[in-house]
Amino acid sequence: MNIHRRLTRKDITLFTLSAVLTIDGLAAAASIGVQSLTWWLIAFLFFAIPYALISIELGTRWPSRGGIVHWVKLAFGVGWSARTSWLYWVNVALWMPATFIMMAGVFAQMFWPAMSLTNQILFALVATWLTVLICCLSLDTGKWIPNAGACCKIVVVFLLGIGGVMTLYRSGLANPINLQTLTPSLDDGLRFFPVIIFSLVGFDLISCIGDEIKDPEKDLPFAQLMAVGLITILYLFAVFGILAALPVEQIGLINGLLATLERIVAPLPGSDILLLILGLLIMFSLVANMVTWSIGANYAAAEAAHSGELPALFGLEHPASGTPVGASVLSGILASLAILLYGVMADSADALYWSLFSFANLVFLLPYLLLFPAYLVLKERDLSPNHGLQLIRHGWAIRAAAFSPWILTAMAVFFFIFPLGAYDLLHTSSTLLGLLLVIGVGEWMRSKRQIREEKLSGCLAS
């Protein structure tokens, strides 16, 4: 066994929990009301479960450093692999600003109620470069941030659910839960349904550092299935807690979590100290979430650079630890520029948060439109039962497992661009313009690489 493989079953479980269990989207998802519980159940059944099974199969049959980038390359070739690696990396760099704007909002609510948008932007910049620094540490050191972050998230999410139970006992539900309110509607429901899909993505992330897993075939299935069960319970419990404690109209995109926790701990002795501790746990979990995704995305980008799919700068590594310093620093630069740009455009923290959050998540989901078709292609090419795990065997089940999460991902992408019931020409046009810019930069880098390869081939032929 490779002595350099450092990720155990416990590490995989906590890493996956840290990646998938995101608290920054809970308030947005709960803001559509009690029907969000039904939307969560739909997403678990038709997205999370088949997606997790697919990730386990691909991770055990084709373990590597690169994960989704490697699988797309095997299925569709270098061109699509290059596009995937770029989108996979750039989405994290764009998502980081939204997360840290939310973190700044939590900090302001706790310590500095009059904190200006300018100071919140400065706060987000500091958090961004702290994340870059952590990602440049060795994996032996850096993996403890996701592990600790997963534990913090479990505590916070569990307390949100407990708060709902306590509120129900003390004063009844803030929002009535019955058949009528649970029935999903297609206006507000589909507007925030993409946030729920986004909140369930990440089961493949550990495979971006798959060569670090001690025993992929034994540890990955157990850890991932354990994570699926815990994530299902914790998400539903947390959303119930928010809806039980706060009327829908009082659930803010940034302050919804702290407002819920404040209502929970208010009757308890030492409530101020408890709320302070919970706020600090929320802030740490947000940092840990970005560290987790940055580690996976930066390793994937570095591997793509080593294969010539991204510029060589992405592939620069720390001489001692082998961490992807180049990709990490570049993500910090891009995230800082995004924070400054959107800071100029937004007139409030909530507006800034949602602009960054929705656009980053749109880019975030695009690589998964390739992941599920790649799974189909790879299953058709190699049906040997002696290599890795085959959790889905029958042809109809394979197609259903791939098509179901693909169609929900495509729906989420569409509604991030064209929000149902809240059409905004400025939002849609700016989102499409930003999307074209991101894709255009990726295509420019890919074409430059192709031109270099053609010149090199010509020189060798001469």
Image (tube, helix red, strand yellow):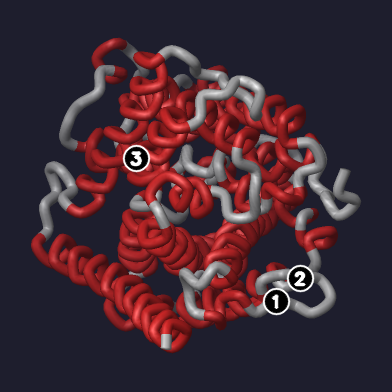
State left or right for residue 330 relative to residue 5.
left
Dot label at residue 31: 3
- Looking at the rendered structure, the kind of residue marked 2 is Gly
The local secondary structure at tag 3 comes to: loop
Dot 1: element: loop
Q: Which mark is residue 322?
A: 2
Residue located at (57% from left, 49% from top): 67
Report the front residue among 388 and 36: 388
Discs 3, 2 touching: Cβ within 8 Å: no
Mark 1 and mark 2 in contact? Answer it, CB < 8 Å. yes
Please state the horizontal and vertical placement of residue 169, each as a whole percent of the image.
Answer: 56, 18
Which circle's residue, 1 or 3, is located before the other in the chain?
3
Residue pointed to by mark 1: 317
Residue mark closest to the camera, 1 vs 3: 1
User: Residue 328, position in %: x, y?
Assistant: 60, 74
Q: Examine the rendered structure and indicate whether residue 280 appears above or below residue 114.
A: above
Of labels 3 and 2, the one closer to you: 2
